[in-house]
């Protein structure tokens, strides 16, 4: 199967194009050895199949981040049959920078000149033929969000695969640099070093001071490269800056010939919206209101409309299965395992799929519309005032989905100090798996203020994270914070397809976990709850009950010192979904037929419910997160520290809530 | 010469990039994001928090420390 790779700047519409090409035939994985997300899909065109690889969005193909190394290694070493470079037509100079690097690499490339509709709106006119001639590569105009030009793009890409590359234009670096490039190229060719990259390209990268190439190259060559750099620096200036300058010069010449732009910049709709949303005083309250609305809608749509239907369906299913099992005279133990264990446990988790669906749909819309970048902007002031980097907030927002990618998102932070802090505080951001726990307790005790309580829980998690960040930056880590640079993409109406695919990603991984990890945890817990043989199932006398009773005293001062709650928290260290699954099993078992919510109403008080929710919000993150902390910090010490200190914080906070609440006469 | 750090510009003011001071890594990154010499920069917002600038229509938020290092030739 032929492979087509997509490469382009962030916000160039690359993902939209990827969705348009592959539809639902896509899957997300990881690049080997690194934690960068790898998206692949299949394109069906005229009866043939093509493998489409969506490379990470980057501004450049240097070695500035892992994303860039992944993208350029794929292009140079995996040899895709063709590379489609997605270029944002409204922002052509900067986007062509990446293109110049592709040309340098000698890539067989075709340009998708995207967002042509927006360019037209801004009165930018581009002579596509001229652009194509000047660059020496095919250029196709597209509007990926409206699927315009996609067929032409595919046809040209496939056609080009069978053709020889025509002479692409080269960048003229000027005499000083060319001389040294040639000298280095010869040295590299004459050495027996095999980097897997073309010699000329390696020579340019060495002059650019590319860290990655410098690491894999021979010491002798590195010394010669240093000499070359010094020679150039003496004659002119730092070679790496000259090289960047020359690339822009090359682009400037092309743009002058092929692009006409209005002199006066028009004030766009985005500018007007930004005046309000990033306002000095209103920005933050607006952000809070938007988030509150998100949670409100989550309940309004997810619970009141969707969940009722699902619940009715689940009940009917449980009854049907139970009826069937009794009819075929299945062993009692098997019936109990399936109805109480699997349906009670895994079912308790699956029940929350509608809410998770709606929440991630709404968050996805905010993300795709361009608002999330503004949220990070607005929050930067607060983050900075406590000594955290503004981008820490982005890793926190990702953490709302799941803390594993949240912690991985800290890679965009350049300084070690910022990054370590961002990693350590991420677990306090409530992930999707913890959501069902709050939903059960909120429905049981605070049905009148659902959205407000849920919003407060999330906000509280952020607050604790920020406070801990402040403490860490004052105590554990020294050094400077790194700089803050972030693009604010124009506001766009999200495409239906992109939003739905995004949501499906989240929901399907939630379901997958329910079917695997949670299923396994529930099975083990169920077995523990019916042993030793002959004991009353799900009772305190079972092994599970005994484990719970052993832990329970620790939680007594926090108001939930029952063996059931303890077992739930214990299971939550494996996976947070398991908390509700376990409660569903032990409570549904104790009170035959009783629903989890009414069982919880009997076992907790409003105050101990709040205290329990605080505990589940803050205490030790799941095993996957601890594993990620270990991998990302490359240290068992920090992983252990994370597991322990979060537990301590969770315990202290829930004890404080319960004890202070009682002082005020709450129960 | 009319060169001033970007951080001193008020909302609505314009200029062209003259030079970027500071470490090579930072300068190169800014170059690659479009702050190359001669590019027109318009300050969209400079009150509290990071500065928002527009580089031929696309917007970038920059921390104040960084904005201090970008020298702009005022128009």
Image (cartoon, rainbow, N blue to C red):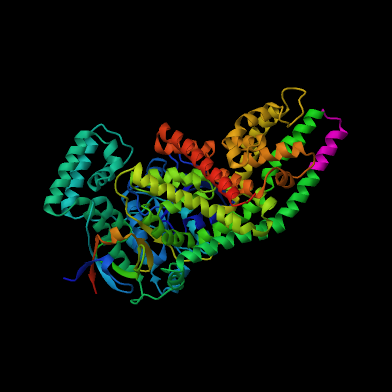
Q: From the viewer's perspective, is A407 left or right of A42?
A: left
Q: Main secondary structure of the magenta part?
A: helix
The picture places residue A633, in percent across and down from the top left corner, at 40, 38
Residue A340: give x, y in percent of width and height.
75, 36
Please say whether residue A404 is one of the residues in the magenta stretch.
no
Q: How many tags in the picture?
A: 0
Q: Quadrant of residue A302?
A: bottom right
- Residue A322 among those drawn in magenta: yes
Where does the image place residue A486, in percent across and percent down from the top left? Answer: 38, 58
**Magenta region:** A318-331
Residue A43 vertical placement versus A129 (above, below): above
Query: What residue occupies the far top of the structure in this picture?
Result: A533
Q: Nearer the viewer, residue A174 or A628?
A: A628
Residue located farthest toward the left when viewing the structure as drawn: A234
Residue A407 can be seen in this image: yes
Give the side of residue A211 with respect to residue A343, left or right. Answer: left
- Residue A76 figure quarter: top left
The reply to whether residue A75 is in sight is no
Front position in the image: A547 or A585: A547
In this rendering, the answer to whether A664 lies above or below A648 is: below
Above or below, comparing residue A511 to residue A11 in the picture = above
Instruction: Name the residue rendered at 70%, 44% in the picture.
Output: A600
* Residue A505 horizontal/vertical position (percent): 58, 49
Horizontal side, residue A103 vs residue A320: left or right: left
Task: Check the image and report above or below for A297 versus A418.
Answer: below
């Amino acid at each position: 199967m032929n492979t087509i790779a997509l490469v382009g700047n962030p916000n160039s519409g690359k993902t939209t194009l990827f969705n348009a090409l592959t539809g639902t035939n896509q899957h997300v994985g990881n690049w080997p050895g690194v934690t960068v997300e790898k998206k692949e899909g299949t394109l069906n065109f005229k009866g043939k199949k093509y493998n489409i690889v969506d490379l990470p969005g980057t501004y450049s193909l240097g070695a500035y981040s892992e994303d860039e190394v992944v993208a350029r290694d794929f292009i140079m070493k995996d040899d895709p049959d063709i590379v489609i470079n997605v270029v944002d037509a409204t922002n052509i100079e900067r986007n062509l920078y990446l293109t110049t690097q592709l040309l340098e690499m000698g890539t067989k490339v075709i340009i998708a000149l995207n967002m042509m509709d927006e360019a037209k709106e801004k009165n930018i006119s581009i002579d596509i033929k001229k652009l194509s001639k000047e660059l020496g590569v095919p250029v196709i105009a597209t509007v990926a969000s409206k699927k315009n030009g996609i067929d032409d793009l595919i046809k040209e890409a496939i056609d080009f695969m069978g053709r020889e590359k025509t002479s692409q234009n080269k960048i003229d670096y000027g005499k000083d640099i060319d001389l040294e490039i040639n000298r280095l190229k010869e040295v590299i060719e004459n050495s027996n070093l095999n980097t897997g990259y073309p010699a000329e390209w390696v020579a340019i990268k060495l002059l650019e001071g590319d860290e990655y190439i410098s690491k894999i190259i021979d010491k002798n060559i590195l010394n010669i490269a240093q000499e070359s750099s010094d020679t150039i620096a003496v004659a002119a200036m730092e070679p790496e800056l000259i090289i960047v300058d020359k690339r822009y010069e090359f682009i400037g010449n092309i743009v002058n010939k092929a692009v006409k732009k209005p002199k006066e910049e028009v004030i766009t709709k985005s500018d007007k919206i930004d005046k309000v949303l990033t306002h000095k005083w209103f920005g933050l309250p607006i952000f809070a209101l938007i988030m509150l609305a998100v949670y409100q809608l989550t309940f309004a749509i997810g619970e009141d409309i969707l969940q009722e239907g699902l619940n009715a369906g689940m009940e009917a299913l449980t009854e049907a299965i139970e009826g069937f099992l009794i009819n075929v005279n299945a062993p009692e133990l098997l019936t109990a395992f399936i109805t109480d264990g699997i349906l009670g446990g895994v079912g308790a988790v699956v029940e929350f799929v509608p809410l998770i669906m709606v929440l991630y749909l709404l968050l996805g819309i905010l993300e795709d519309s361009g608002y999330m970048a503004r949220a990070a902007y607005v929050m930067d002031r607060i983050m900075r005032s406590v000594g955290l980097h503004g981008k820490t907030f982005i890793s926190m927002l990702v953490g709302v989905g799941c803390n594993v990618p949240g912690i991985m998102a800290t890679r965009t932070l350049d300084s070690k100090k910022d990054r370590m802090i961002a990693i350590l505080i991420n677990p306090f951001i409530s992930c999707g798996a913890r959501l069902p726990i709050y939903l059960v307790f909120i429905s049981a005790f605070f049905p009148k203020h659902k959205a407000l309580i849920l919003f407060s829980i999330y906000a509280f998690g952020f607050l604790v994270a920020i406070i801990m960040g402040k403490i860490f930056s004052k105590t554990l880590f020294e050094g400077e914070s790194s700089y803050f640079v972030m693009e604010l993409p124009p506001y766009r109406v999200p495409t239906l397809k992109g939003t739905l695919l995004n949501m499906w990603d989240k929901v399907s991984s939630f379901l997958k976990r329910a079917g695997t990890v949670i299923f396994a945890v529930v099975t083990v817990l169920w077995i523990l709850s019916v042993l030793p043989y002959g004991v009353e199932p799900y009772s305190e006398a079972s092994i599970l009950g005994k484990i719970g009773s052993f832990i329970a005293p620790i939680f007594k001062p926090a108001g939930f010192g029952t063996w059931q709650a303890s077992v739930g928290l214990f299971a939550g260290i494996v996976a947070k979904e398991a908390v509700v699954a376990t409660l569903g099993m032990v409570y549904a078992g104790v009170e035959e037929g009783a629903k989890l919510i009414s069982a919880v109403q009997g076992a907790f008080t409003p105050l101990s419910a709040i205290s329990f929710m605080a505990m589940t919000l803050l205490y030790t993150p799941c095993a996957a997160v601890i594993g990620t902390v270990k991998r990302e910090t490359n240290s068992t010490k920090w992983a252990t520290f994370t597991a322990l200190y979060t537990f301590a914080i969770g315990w202290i906070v829930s004890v404080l809530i319960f004890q202070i609440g009682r002082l005020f006469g709450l129960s | 010469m009319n060169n001033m750090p970007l951080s001193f510009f008020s909302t609505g003011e314009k200029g062209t990039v003259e030079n970027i001071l500071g470490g090579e890594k930072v300068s190169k990154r800014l170059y690659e994001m479009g702050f190359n010499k001669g590019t027109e920069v318009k300050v969209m917002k400079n009150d509290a928090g990071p500065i928002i600038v527009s580089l031929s229509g696309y917007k970038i938020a920059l921390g104040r420390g960084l904005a201090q290092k970008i020298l702009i030739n005022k128009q």
